[in-house]
Image: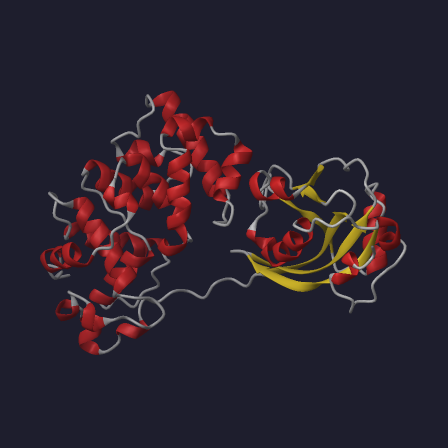
Amino acid sequence: MTLPDIAPPLLRWYEQNKRTLPFRTVSTPYRVWVSEIMLQQTRVSAALPYFERFMAELPTVADLAACDPERLHKLWEGLGYYSRVRNLQKAAQIVMEQHGGALPADYDALLKLPGVGAYTAGAIASISFGLPVPAVDGNVLRVFARILNDGRDVTRPDVKKDLTACVMKLQPPERPGDYNQALMELGALACLPGGAPLCSECPLRGLCAARALGVQETLPVKAPPAAKRTQHWTVALVLDMENRRVLLQQRPQKGLLAGLWQPVLLEGARSAIQTEQALAALGVTARAVEPLTPARHVFSHLVWEMDGFACAAQSCAPPPGCVWAGRAEVDGVYTLPGAFKAYRPVLKKYLKRKEKVDIISVSENRCAGGCGWDFFWRQN
């Protein structure tokens, strides 16, 4: 296969059009590593404030390795895919123990770190250490599928291997980091996904085989994703009306959203009475006083369909695996994953109220469903 010489026009374009990003302005190996982990399944614009906050609190590998896991989750709250940050800390601890606190300037050694795959290792090695290795992500696969008019499924390992070999044949050995970043940037700014490339802004438009044939919008080819399983849950937003607290439940330390905190979550779709009975089995006396708006959260492999109730509870000792949390704890200590973001406004509205509430009158009544949150405040 004859490959077009894309490096010269690509690098000229990159110098003129690359975005100013904090992990490029100061591109230490640690900052590049953290940014690459954050940018997995996250847009650059969404990740930037998290990156700045993370670096301000954990500026070194040593800080990351020693960080309290609960605090680490809180710093990551909102980014999702929390296994990324758990692996990040595990890797930092290995770097401290085995590499003297400095990321190794070795592609194979980087690959051995938890959470570091071929792309991340290639990005760190080429950008931070100038090593001539590939860093092939979805952006790069899309660019090369179009340049070469390759209609094969880019999610297949053999196809990815072939395209990676093409990437490396064209990589200038004196500028591997810039070349890899330029390809990523081209995919982010011009060679866009979803059948909408901005060919008029692409420095490689004259070298693109797919554009020459007018088929660039049909590439890359990907196999359809597998169907997601659906699970139904009932969210019990259990509120201690007297002390202005919410009951939070910690998830198991392994599996989905491991170790994070959530409102009490009950399997299946439950009625108000069934929700109250389930809470009573946990040792919590509560009334389901208002239905919550149904919510839906899509994970990579499954979908949660959630209904629920705001429940007014008598103050009591928290059940095993649970804590009572006030506003300060919800805001600064306990990490609630994005799966429950639909319920945060309701929770914050409750927690910020300062009026004393007559818990007896609340606990002896049940809202039929249309009274709204003012029901809680009209009891005085």
Q: Residue furthest right?
A: 364
Residue name at image x 18 percent, y 68 percent: 208
Task: Determine whether 120 is above or below 220 in the image.
Answer: above
Task: Determine whether 145 is above or below 311 in the image.
Answer: below
Quadrant hosting residue 288: bottom right
Quadrant hosting residue 2: bottom left
Q: Is residue 226 left or right of residue 283?
A: left
Q: Nearer the viewer, residue 204 or 22?
A: 22
Q: Position of residue 303 (x, y in %)?
A: 59, 60
Q: Position of residue 128 (x, y in %)?
A: 23, 38
Q: Position of residue 41 (x, y in %)?
A: 42, 53
Tell me the quadrant of the picture where the C terminus can be found.
bottom right
Task: Determine whether 18 is above or below 193 in the image.
Answer: above
Quadrant hosting residue 301: bottom right
Tell me the quadrant of the picture where the N terminus can be found.
bottom left
Residue name at image x 45 percent, y 33 percent: 89
Residue name at image x 28 percent, y 35 percent: 29
Q: Position of residue 125 (x, y in %)?
A: 25, 38
Q: Nearer the viewer, residue 312 or 361?
A: 361
Q: Is residue 149 left or right of residue 101?
A: left
Looking at the picture, the colour scheme in use is: secondary structure
